[in-house]
Image (cartoon, grey):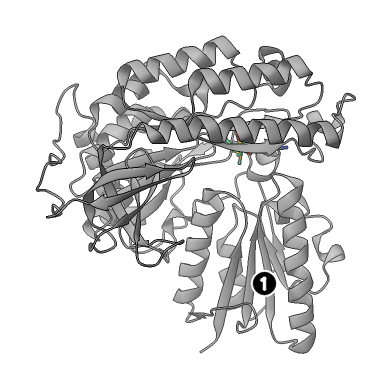
């Protein structure tokens, strides 16, 4: 049997795309290889959000070149955002690459392999040629957790970001199709779903009137699916945290008490230059609204330091917001100029030395604040979804709380179990604890079973009706004719 190996760079969207790539290759009869060396088909699912992933990918491709030289029969495939960004020069830069495809043209790899390499060598695109990979088979890493893609692309114009150029404008997946996938996943034993979109909470705005649905309604509909115990979503944009979304988060028992709220900068002046469309004050108002509605909410964020023109005062304002919000965690980035973006052409770029000093100060503060937040959990009992053995101590188990914090704990449960863990220690990124004995099964014990609320009016019946039609259309057999705008005829 021929074997494949997929190397994934970047965000959760790429990780999810890789599950589809793997599923598709397995449907073609390939098995998974443990390493690049053992594989006949090497796939690189790339990222280009910052310079670092570009460099990591270049190092991997150097290795692939050596492998290909030793065995010219090996197929080297490059997909994802870097491939899309370099579409005009990819094959000149890397002539040993056999096939390339952008994030919206994933099925092209199967076409190419199925045609014995006779199909076009590259397929890219950020327009109508894009397809949701949701209809492809999927190779899930865990049987109890799943990502569900709800949209592709992004309509924002953040001046530092390359995503709109490589993933195109935002297109929402049809609600019935999403609900059908969630229902199917739940029937297969998935209890935690994460809805994925570049700007996940703006989902639905572009849907045609017949299927028009708000993101909050989608949360309510997923909440009503039997077997779904936890719902997460990422990445939301602060500008799209409307009242109805916050209300749905507060009222849906399965929606976890965690919001990722990318700040990027605490300075209104820099936010304006970034074209983020909110001010520091507006952002802090959203934080207040979220916390008022969901008192035990965990908040995480993304922050960029060293954006062009960022003064010492602007940076101090970012530190002030970190202290004020008291984030439970943050992804911190040094600004990286991306070719073709508005910010890369700005004259007032910041010296590398200054960026380094700022990121060090920011990381230190984020760690201090997050550790204090985690310490507040000591002595409490948290509901944990067991994921497997601890990465640092195989004698312990590892899992996640509803607030999305990793817990290493002593216990005897199996991956996929929802258990109570008494929290006994905390660092800035993890908690430590002991499983409460006897551990409760999903619907027993002190954690109340998920109750399906009926008020305000549930959008479920309408979405279920859509899902019934979408199921016929899109689950099981793939229907290449089914586009977002062809709803009316069905
Ligand atoms: N759509 C999400 C949002 O609006 O926050 C984030 C998507 S992006 C894949 C993830 C994060 O990468 C961003 O939130 C930002 O902090 C960071 N990022 C994007 N472009 C960057 C750049 N040019 N330099 C440094 N960090 C960047
Ligand atoms: Fe990039 Fe901004 Fe879109 Fe996020 S919202 S993907 S940062 S353009």
The answer to whether residue 200 is seen in the rendering is no
Direction from residue 329 to residue 378 in the image, left or right:
left
Q: Look at mark 1 in the image and give the residue it sits on.
A: 119
Where does the image place residue 325, in percent across and percent down from the top left? 49, 21
- Which image quarter: residue 127? top right
Total marks placed: 1
Direction from residue 78 to residue 340 in the image, left or right:
right
Residue that extends furthest to the left in the rendered view of this protein = 444
Q: Looking at the image, is 424 positioned above or below residue 321? A: below
Q: Which quarter of the rendered image does ligand 1 occupy? A: top right
Q: 131 or 282: which is nearer to us?
A: 282
Residue that extends furthest to the top in the rendered view of this protein = 281
Where does the image place residue 343, in percent across and percent down from the top left? 79, 29
| Residue located at (63% from left, 77% from top) | 36
| Residue located at (71% from left, 39% from top) | 162
For the C terminus, the quadrant is top left
- Which image quarter: residue 157? top right
Direction from residue 73 to residue 132 in the image, left or right:
left
| Residue located at (34% from left, 20% from top) | 244
Q: Looking at the image, is 13 positioned above or below residue 416? A: above
- Which image quarter: residue 187? bottom left
């Amino acid at each position: 049997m021929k074997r494949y190996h997929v190397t994934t760079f970047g965000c959760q969207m790429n990780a999810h795309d890789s599950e589809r790539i793997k599923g598709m290759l397995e449907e073609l009869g390939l098995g998974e290889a443990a390493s690049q060396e053992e594989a006949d088909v090497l796939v690189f699912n790339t990222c280009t959000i910052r310079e670092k992933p570009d460099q990591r990918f270049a190092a991997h491709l150097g290795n692939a070149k050596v492998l290909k030289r030793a065995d010219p029969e090996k197929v080297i495939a490059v997909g994802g955002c870097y491939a899309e960004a370099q579409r005009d020069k990819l094959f000149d830069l890397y002539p040993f690459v056999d096939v390339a495809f952008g994030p919206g043209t994933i099925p092209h790899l199967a076409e190419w392999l199925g045609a014995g390499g006779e199909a076009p060598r590259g397929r890219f695109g950020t327009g109508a040629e894009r397809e949701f990979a949701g209809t492809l088979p999927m190779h899930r890493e865990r049987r109890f957790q799943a990502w569900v893609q709800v949209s592709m692309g992004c309509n924002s114009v953040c001046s530092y970001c390359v995503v709109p150029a490589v993933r195109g404008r935002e297109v929402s997946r049809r609600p019935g199709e999403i609900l059908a996938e969630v229902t199917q996943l739940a029937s297969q034993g998935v209890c935690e779903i994460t809805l994925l979109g570049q700007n996940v909470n703006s989902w639905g705005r572009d849907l045609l009137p017949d299927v028009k649905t708000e993101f909050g309604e989608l949360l309510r509909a997923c909440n009503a699916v039997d077997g779904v115990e936890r719902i997460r979503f990422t990445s939301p944009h602060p500008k799209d945290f409307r009242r109805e979304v916050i209300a749905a988060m507060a009222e849906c028992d399965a929606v976890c008490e965690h919001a990722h709220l990318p700040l990027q900068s605490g300075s209104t002046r820099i936010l304006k230059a970034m074209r983020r469309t909110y001010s520091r004050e507006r952002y802090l108002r959203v934080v207040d609204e979220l916390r008022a509605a969901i008192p035990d909410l965990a908040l995480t964020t993304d922050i960029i330091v060293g954006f062009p023109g960022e003064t010492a005062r602007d940076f101090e304002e970012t530190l002030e917001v970190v202290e004020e919000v008291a984030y439970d965690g943050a992804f911190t980035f040094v600004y990286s100029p991306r070719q073709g973006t508005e910010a890369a052409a700005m004259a007032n770029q910041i010296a590398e030395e200054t960026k380094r000093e700022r990121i060090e100060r920011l990381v230190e503060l984020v760690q201090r604040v997050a550790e204090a937040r985690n310490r507040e959990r000591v002595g409490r009992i948290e509901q944990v979804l067991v994921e497997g053995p601890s990465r640092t101590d195989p004698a312990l188990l590892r899992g996640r709380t509803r607030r999305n914090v990793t817990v290493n704990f002593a216990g005897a449960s199996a991956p996929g179990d929802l258990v109570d863990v008494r929290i006994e220690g905390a660092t800035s990124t993890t908690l430590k604890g002991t499983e409460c004995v006897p551990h409760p099964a999903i619907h027993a014990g002190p954690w109340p079973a998920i109750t399906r609320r009926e008020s305000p009016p549930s959008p479920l019946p309408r979405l279920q009706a859509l899902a019934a039609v979408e199921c016929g259309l899109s689950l099981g057999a793939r229907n290449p004719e089914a586009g977002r705008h062809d709803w009316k005829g069905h």
